[in-house]
Image: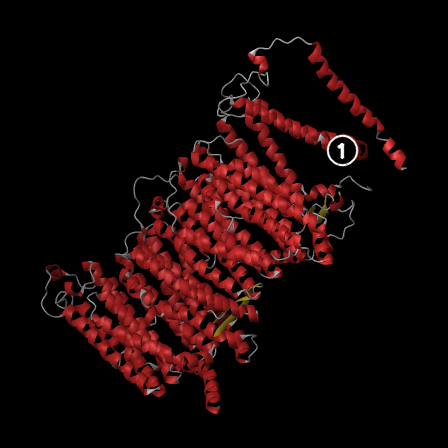
Amino acid sequence: MTLANLNSLILTLVTFIPLAGALLLVLCPRRDRDIRILALVVTLLTFAVSLHLPAHFHRSQGGFQFEVSRQWITTPNIHYHMAVDGVSLWLVVLTTFLTPLCVLISWKSIDSRVKEFFILLLVLETALIGVFTSLDLFLFYFFWEATLIPMALLIGMYGHGRKVYAAVKFFLYTMIASVFMLAAILWLYAKTGSFDFTTLQSAISHGQVAGFLSAAPWLFLAFFIAFAVKVPLFPFHTWLPDAHVEAPTAGSVMLAGVLLKMGTYGMLRFNLGLFPEQARRNAPWIITLALVGIVYGALVALVQPNMKKLIAYSSISHLGFVVLGIFSFTQVGLDGAVFVMLAHGVSTGALFMLAGILYQRRHTYEIKDFGGLATPMPRYAAFFLFIVLASAGLPLLNGFVGEFLVLSGAFQARALYGIVAATGIIWSAGYLLWLYQRTFFGKITHQENQALPDLSGFETAALLPAAAAALLMGVAPLLWLNMIDPAVHTALLPFSDVLSKVAGQ
Amino acid sequence: MTQTIPQVADYIRILPELVLAFFGLVVMVLDPLLDDEGSRKTLGGIALLGALCGLGASLWMAQSPGLAFWNMVRVDSFSVFFHVLITAIVAVVILTSYEYMAVQRIRAGEYYGLILFGAVGMTLMSSAVELVLIFIALEISSISSYVLAGFRRREASSSESSLKYFLLGSFATAFFLYGVALMFGATGSTNITAISQALQAKGVPRLAYVAVALMFVGLGFKVASAPFHVWTPDVYEGAPAPIVALMSTGSKAAAFAVLLRVMFEINTPGRFWLIWVSAALSMTLGNLSALVQDNVKRLLAYSSIAHAGYLLVAFAAQPGPGISAAMFYTASYAAMNVGAFAVVSHFAGAEERYVTLADYAGLGRRSPLLAATLTIFLLSLIGIPITGGFFAKFYVFSAALKSGLVWLTLIGLLNSAIGAYYYLRIIVMMYMREPKGEITVRRIPASLGVALALSVLATLYLGVLPGRVLDFALRSATQLMQPHRAAITPAPTPPVGTM
Amino acid sequence: MPENYIVRYLPLLFHMLIAAVLAGGMVVLSYFVGYRRPTRAKMSPYECGMTPVGDARGRFSVKFYLVAMLFILFDVEAVFLYPWAVILRQLKMFGFYEMMVYIGIVLVGLFYVWKKGVLDWNQTSTRRGTI
């Protein structure tokens, strides 16, 4: 097979290998060990195949690559249109990278209904990759909704505590919000007869859509609400802590690592891409919400007695940075936003894995139940420290680069934004280090903690790649940024128009 | 009178009805000759054969489109679509009934005969283009379903269901007939083509508005749209589950076919607000009432009201996209709802004991296959991608938006989000709650397995490759919009209106 | 023509007159000629064995209903034979075959009813299931 052939096929492969694996699992007999191994093989294969993308990506180009576009359904005019640019490419790789880790971390902790668990996980992976690769709005919505069910089922079937409540809340929140997006997509289709992102984009920018000007504010809001709930932006965040606390470890990792990025990715691609002028107009209050989210998330995290809730609120805070970066409309800000998405995926994913490992031993997330764990679990403590530092933004680790870029962007846009956001970084160092101190240092207060076993082989295997990635991203961020940068530049092109228009008036 | 003798082609154009009626008669003749066990097995087989032959006959009928029997019946893509749909539904319902009849210890006999006779009425409804014939077909299908609804004779609820359905149903058909009479008064004809020509030529008399409203009352009852929906939950709760599957899909499809013909082919005056209000009410009332149901059959009943509402949205849209969207919706709703009721009827057990939501707790553990199938149907009812329900909603709402019905679309979309909640409750029950008490789930017999597999396949097929079905629907819609071209064949008798 | 027109209906008038005279004559004659020995039963409005006044919820055998229903069904079906007979000549053999099919369907119904034991007055429950 020639490279050109492979290039047009690669996105289909990456997207659907997990689904094929899921179908294979359906047919597989219920022997848990075989199922786990099969799931691991499939996810590793997907990851390996997805590495083709960065390897053969033309770095200098900002546009979409590996494009495939076929007519799928004639009426309505739906294309199987997939392609990636520098932003979505890395989100795809992030997804394929995290899924095998999820398989590893669930190796022992999932012991009933194993088959269903891995089937759901693989279906989820396909849906997530599909969200990032599809350029047809219809296809996008299709995958967007398709992520809901496996995720809700993962929470509801394998979670703990009030799992059903959390699953239903998660489902309803995001479902109702995305209804508005569907309405907007249908409106655009009714007016233009196309779902294709690029077609729509050029039609809108050339003013060829009838009635667009009066509808644009509503369309923007409709898309924005769907994405804001997913991110989650400050007032829409209430589903997140519940979903995280009750979800199984792998569910939390996928949720925080990838699912939340769907929202920010959507803002970047669709809110900015289709409605630049509206984005510009609405930016002030969106940035305000993002800032409130950064500070609020951090403050609530500070007082959380529950380890997983703490990480969940820290996610709200970090995702606030992403939104801030996106709506700063500066090159560095957007670079940083994308980088924070990736870095947050790796390090928060790892944090949830660490919390899950502890839960499996002690069946609690309460911080006060631990203390002095560094003595019985030295290797675990080392990993934890590494990830905490990465997450808190220590230079030379992944968290630093993104947040630094976002802050520079925010300062460029308006100094006040940067100042408020910078406090978020301080808070985050505070709650993470305090968490670490309470959990690992001091005397062992609970007898059960005396003889906790250290990391098992599978757990180490799951954590090591994440830690390595965190280090690599901190040391050599250019590997990522030189693909993100051209893409972001393209995304910002309409804004230079808007800016010059504003300046000219 | 130059020619009164029908030609062979006329018979081919009602061949499905003839075949179904013939097999119905065979069932009736054989029933008294067989004992209980034999009647279940043999008659079920014959009925299935009949439905399949009816399906084949529908496809054969498609080869010779045109008018038949003095312009009373028209075979076009539209009627072929509904013929195939209804016979397929009937076949699946019969497959579902095998096990049901055995478990409920109901003597089968007339049951299968009545299903086939009902099918005659339903198929005829979709090809009749003459209001009196439509009325007769409506009555044939209704009377069969009145009897079928009361087939669980030992249960009071079933008799209640039958009686309620009968009383309210005859009331509603009377409205329809009154509407037909007024339409005749307004235009001087009962033939749909003649009516539309008269309305175009002479302007719309005030009487015609009343006639349309009255006919809408009658048909609105049949499709269970608000505010004519109150019978639905009680009737669905009491009637045998496979029959509910038939009523909620087959009869509904037929009634929608009539509604499409009446509304669009006549291009009825003043339909817009009638439908708008009814659609909005059905969606909202159906979904809100379904939220609090504890009985799965009642829940699905309210859900079927809501779905009638979504479907009516298509009727408020422009004819072109509206008709095809409505047709697609009927097909995909049939696939998922027949499947859902097949699962319900299997799980219900003897005397339909297990029909509450609480009984479904832990079904995911007890019978993973059954739970997984039901999940697919429920997801389709919610309207999740890769299921037929998604494209159904999609086509309807995009048709509505294309016609500028932004508010109705928003009401519909919000309603489908509300709807997600109660379907989800069942899924949550099945997978996330521990099983309570001792409910033994029987093995899925082969017949039911085939029925479920067919429904799942249809649901997924419509969800992944909706193109072919939709293209067919679009073609039918165009034919329906230009009926006069099809009606050009020289009329052998004076216009029906003068007879 | 108008004169002729009314004249054509003259036989009808005679027919009605004769009928009225005949019926009225019988009643009048029996009043004058007949014997009368009134009893209680004879004084009641009808003499078919039913009490004319009483509880409306009196029960009688379900078979009455069945027979009444069957009567109406077959009666109505028989009515269709009349219009058919009028135009049979125009319909030629086609009409004949059509009616045979129709009667065949009615006969299937009769066969069904018979075999189900509905016509068997003596049995409380039929051979094949209960009615």
The quadrant where residue A271 appears = bottom left
Q: Secondary structure at mark 1?
A: helix
Is B201 positioned to the left or the right of B23 in the image? Answer: right
Report the amino acid beneath label 1: Gly
- Which of these two is toward me, B416 or A199? B416
Q: Is residue A482 visible?
A: yes
10 Å crowding of disc 1: few (<14), some (14-19), many (20+): some
Point out residue B201 in the picture as x, y percentages from the top left corner.
74, 58
- Which of these two is toward me, B451 or C25? C25
Is A50 positioned to the left or the right of B131 in the image? Answer: left
Q: In this picture, is B29 found above or below A56?
A: above
Q: In this picture, is A456 found above or below B256?
A: below
For the point 51% across and 41% down, which residue is it?
B93
- Which of these two is toward me, B26 or B279? B279
Point out residue A161 in the picture as x, y percentages from the top left corner.
25, 56
For the point 37% across and 52% down, which residue is it?
B425
- Report the coloring of the rendering: secondary structure
Subunit of label 1 = C
Q: Is residue A480 visible?
A: no
> Residue at the bottom extreme?
A504
Q: In this picture, is A106 found above or below B498?
A: below
Is A293 positioned to the left or the right of B339 in the image? Answer: left
Q: In this picture, is A446 found above or below B183?
A: below
State the residue position of label 1: C95
Point out residue B92 in the picture as x, y percentages from the top left corner.
52, 43
- Which of these two is toward me, A431 or C123? C123
Point out residue C77 in the picture as x, y percentages from the top left corner.
67, 30
Is C47 positioned to the left or the right of A475 in the image? Answer: right
Instruction: Count all numbered tags in the image, as a single digit.
Output: 1
For the point 43% across and 81% down, which residue is it?
A280
